[in-house]
């Protein structure tokens, strides 16, 4: 059996090589609130390993609120250029501050300033208000490094299910499901 993380790595590498103008790290993140109402949005999954798939956001955002009350989520990568998609489900936890700091340090300065300026998911009276906030943070941190805001950091989705879907002729797609059982993975081929 091929390890699902290694299968993901191989599939991701193929997608990245043929990405063109698209970002292969883009994935749909689905969360839900306490009433079970689902919500989905695109996030960038810049890092992954056997421990999980990491994404970063504002801890005051709608997704963060939902993860605080229901710490389970699903990711969906779709790469039409190679005819593949990958679904990942599992529990989610916040990353340690050191992990968030390391990723933050690698972000471009404009993205760092934008994280300070945006009150993600909160109502905004005008774009001009956002631009003024951005300008105030540009001034505040001019000439120095931009520290990571205390309300911004990462999450790790620890996979308990990973499903690969590969486009097949006549809609006879190849599907492979991996379910975590104790310390190992169980693989099943699924009907298209």
Image: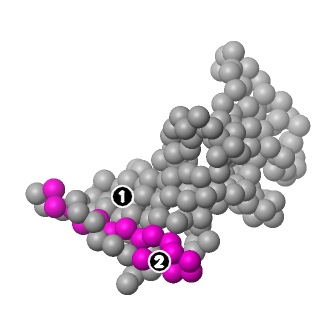
Look at the image and tell me in which quarter the N terminus lies. Answer: bottom left
According to the picture, the residue beneath numbered tag 2 turns out to be: 185
- At x 53% / y 34%, what residue is drawn? 37
Estimate the spatial distance between the alpha carbons at disc 1 and disc 2, rounded to whole Å. Answer: 19 Å
- At x 63% / y 38%, what residue is drawn? 34
Is disc 1 placed on a helix, strand or loop?
strand
Q: Quadrant of residue 31?
A: top right
Sooner in the amino-acid sequence: mark 1 or mark 2? 1
User: Looking at the image, can residue 178 be seen?
Assistant: yes
Residue 85: image tag: 1
- Residue 122's place in the image compared with 155, above or below, is above
Q: Which residues are magenta?
A: 171-186
Residue farthest to the left, as pictured: 170
Q: Position of residue 9 (x, y in %)?
A: 46, 72
**Residue 155 covered by magenta stretch:** no
- At x 42% / y 58%, what residue is drawn? 87
Q: Position of residue 23 (x, y in %)?
A: 46, 53
Is 135 left or right of 47, judged from the image as shown?
Answer: right
Mark 1 packing: few (<14 Cα in 10 Å), some, or many (20+)?
many
Give the main secondary structure of the magenta stretch: strand
Residue 166: image tag: none
Q: Between tags 1 and 2, which lies in front?
A: 2
Q: Nearer the viewer, residue 174 or 42?
A: 174
Is 147 left or right of 188, judged from the image as shown?
Answer: right
Q: Quadrant of residue 156?
A: bottom right
Residue farthest to the top, as pictured: 125
Q: Position of residue 52 (x, y in %)?
A: 59, 67
């Amino acid at each position: 059996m091929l390890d699902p993380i290694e299968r993901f790595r191989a599939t991701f590498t193929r997608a990245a090589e043929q990405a063109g103008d698209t970002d292969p790290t883009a994935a749909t993140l689905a969360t839900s609130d306490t009433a079970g109402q689902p919500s989905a949005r695109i996030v960038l999954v810049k890092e992954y390993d056997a421990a999980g798939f990491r994404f970063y956001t504002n801890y005051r955002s709608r997704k963060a609120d939902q993860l605080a009350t229901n710490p389970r989520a699903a990711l969906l990568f779709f790469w039409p250029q190679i005819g593949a998609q990958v679904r990942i489900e599992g529990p989610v936890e916040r990353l340690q501050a050191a992990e968030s700091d390391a990723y933050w340090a690698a972000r471009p300065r404009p993205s760092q300033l934008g994280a300070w300026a945006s009150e993600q998911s909160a109502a905004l009276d005008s774009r001009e208000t956002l631009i003024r906030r951005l300008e105030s943070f540009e001034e505040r941190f001019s000439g120095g490094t931009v520290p990571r805001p205390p309300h911004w950091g990462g999450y790790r989705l620890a996979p308990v299910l990973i499903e690969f879907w590969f486009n097949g002729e006549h809609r006879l797609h190849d599907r492979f499901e991996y379910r975590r059982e104790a310390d190992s993975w169980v693989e099943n081929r699924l009907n298209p």
